[in-house]
């Protein structure tokens, strides 16, 4: 029920007094109501649930999360190449710091509304 | 969302399904866990993602995931299913519903069989579709089954607001909304499930924020991690949760910050508050949880299907005597522990709603072959 999918807003217009938009989900374009996202603009990503945008996707946050996770991956692989460096917590890319960051809350994001 | 172009990538979705990243995160989980812990994922969408990706079988043996009550189709009380069936069978009614509800068993039959018998039952993707149906069928009464958690409440509320704005007199809603924090409170208060930490539902929190969980985390000493739906998101939520548990912390953290902020979506909350007010709500298989539902405010009583069709009140209901879905929904039993699972009860012939819904735990166990805690499953975990 709570399934919601990210898509890119490609058009915004008004219909029946509602703020509507066309949203592109990897090639499939559907109409969505954007009344809950007064600040969203064309080119932004939104998360759509039952035909309503419920969030402006924070792209910077998504990128930094993935970078953080990939950093971990890199550090683990690097450590594997270099024997037990990772386990000892002395790998060059300072994996413990990354691992700590991974388990902590992210930067405060601003409300999307 | 269906009909996805198979050839194209879905940005901000595919990256969070990366198997390699998920495994790395689970390696970290394995390194972190030193004692047995039990986590509950709230949302049925998360349950399905966990079973589909096999995450449950890749966790360390002493870390257990139990499945929460976050499936609105599953917890919609039988009385309301029976009311829906009675309304849908009326010749003047077009009954519109999200697809999952059609096969949910009522006391006697389901909405599908009403349709087979000639009732006008339609599946809608969005509540706004129902307004279109009402416009196109002025001589019919269109009734929409407004179910869901906080994620769906603003959309359903907006349909009522637009119906009023458009002067639609042939549109009404049968409301069965439920809310998450009172259900978590009830689970913690009873203590039977022995849950040590929660993965909160990412899209409920997208709408409502997560400030409501802070007093719960403090009062009951349980970490709550707002978690998304893809394997990377879930593995990360699990890691953050066990890390808190191992460090003796009980805080609310956000592992789904690309969609969720602490305050949530305020315009959506304002629409919920305008149309709905909190009420006590019976959850199928669980019972009444105080303050755990929304009902229409008096100002919108004209759109209440139960007011418009007063004779559908007070239907006598009858639950299956074998089904243990209530225990499954509270995290007290696994679907495979039910004697009817996979034999008397299948998605084709369900005894309980948890076997029907695309978010129901029983349906997930059936679909992804968790018929028993098989030796092979144990081997993979070890």
Image (cartoon, rainbow, N blue to C red):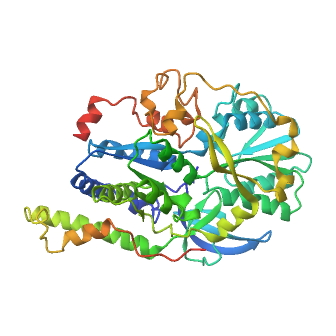
Residue A106 coordinates in the image, percent (x, y): 39, 72
- Relative to B126, is A79 above or below? below
Q: Is residue B79 left or right of residue A26?
A: right
**In the rendered image, is residue A2 in sight?**
no
**Which residue does the image show at 61% across and 42% down from the upper left?**
B73
View extreme (front): residue: B219
The vertical placement of B241 against B191, above or below, is: below
Of A12 and A75, the residue lying toward us: A75
Q: Which of B35 and B3 lies nearest the eye of the viewer?
A: B35
Q: In x, y percent, where is residue B166?
A: 86, 63
Displayed quadrant of residue A22: bottom right
Provide residue B41's location: percent of width, then percent of height. Answer: 44, 49
Residue B203 visible from this viewpoint: yes
Query: Which residue is depicted at the point 58% across and 26% down?
Result: B349
Left or right: residue B210 versus residue B21 is: right
Which residue occupies the foreground of this view, B85 or B265?
Answer: B265
- Residue B269's quadrant in the figure? bottom right
């Amino acid at each position: 029920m709570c399934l919601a999918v990210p898509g890119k807003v490609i058009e915004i217009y008004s219909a029946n007094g509602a703020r509507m938009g066309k949203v592109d989900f990897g090639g499939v374009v559907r109409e969505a109501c954007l009344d809950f996202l007064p600040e969203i603009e064309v080119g932004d990503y939104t998360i759509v649930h039952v035909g309503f945008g419920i969030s402006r996707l924070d792209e910077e946050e998504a990128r930094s999360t993935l970078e953080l996770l990939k950093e971990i991956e890199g550090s683990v692989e690097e450590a594997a190449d270099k024997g037990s460096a990772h386990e000892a917590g002395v790998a060059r890319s300072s994996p413990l710091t990354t691992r700590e960051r991974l388990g902590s809350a992210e930067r405060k994001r601003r409300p999307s509304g | 969302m269906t009909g996805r172009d198979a050839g194209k990538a879905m940005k901000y979705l595919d990256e969070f399904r990366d198997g390699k990243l998920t495994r790395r995160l689970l390696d970290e989980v394995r390194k972190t866990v030193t004692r047995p812990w039990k986590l509950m994922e709230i949302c049925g969408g998360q349950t399905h993602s966990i079973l589909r990706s096999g995450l449950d079988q890749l966790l360390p043996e002493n870390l257990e995931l139990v499945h929460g009550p976050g499936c609105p189709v599953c917890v919609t009380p039988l009385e309301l299913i029976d009311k829906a069936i009675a309304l849908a069978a009326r010749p003047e009614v077009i009954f519109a519903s999200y697809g999952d509800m059609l096969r949910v068993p009522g006391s006697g039959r389901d909405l599908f069989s009403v349709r087979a018998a000639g009732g006008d039952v339609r599946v809608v993707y969005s509540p706004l579709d129902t307004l279109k149906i009402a416009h196109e069928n002025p001589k019919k009464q269109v009734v929409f089954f407004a179910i869901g958690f906080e994620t769906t409440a603003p959309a359903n509320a907006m349909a009522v607001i637009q119906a009023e704005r458009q002067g639609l007199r042939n549109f009404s809603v049968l409301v069965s909304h439920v809310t998450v924090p009172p259900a978590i409170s009830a689970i913690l208060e009873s203590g039977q499930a022995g849950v040590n930490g929660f993965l909160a539902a990412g899209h409920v929190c997208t709408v409502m924020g997560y400030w409501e969980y802070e007093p719960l985390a403090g009062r009951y000493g349980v970490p709550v991690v707002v978690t998304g739906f893809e394997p990377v998101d879930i593995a990360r939520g699990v890691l953050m949760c066990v890390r808190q548990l191992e460090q003796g912390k009980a805080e609310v953290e956000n592992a789904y910050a690309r969609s969720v902020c602490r305050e949530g979506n305020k315009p959506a909350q304002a629409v919920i508050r305008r149309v709905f007010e909190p009420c006590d709500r019976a959850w199928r298989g669980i019972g009444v949880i105080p303050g755990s539902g929304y009902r229409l405010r008096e100002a919108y009583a004209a759109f209440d299907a139960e007011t418009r069709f007063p004779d559908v009140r007070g239907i006598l209901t009858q639950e299956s005597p074998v089904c243990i879905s209530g225990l499954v929904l509270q995290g007290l039993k696994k679907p495979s522990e039910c004697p009817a699972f996979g034999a008397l009860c299948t998605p084709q012939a369900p005894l309980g709603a948890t076997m029907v819904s695309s978010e129901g735990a029983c349906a997930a166990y059936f679909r992804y072959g968790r018929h028993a805690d098989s030796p092979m499953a144990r081997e993979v975990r070890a």
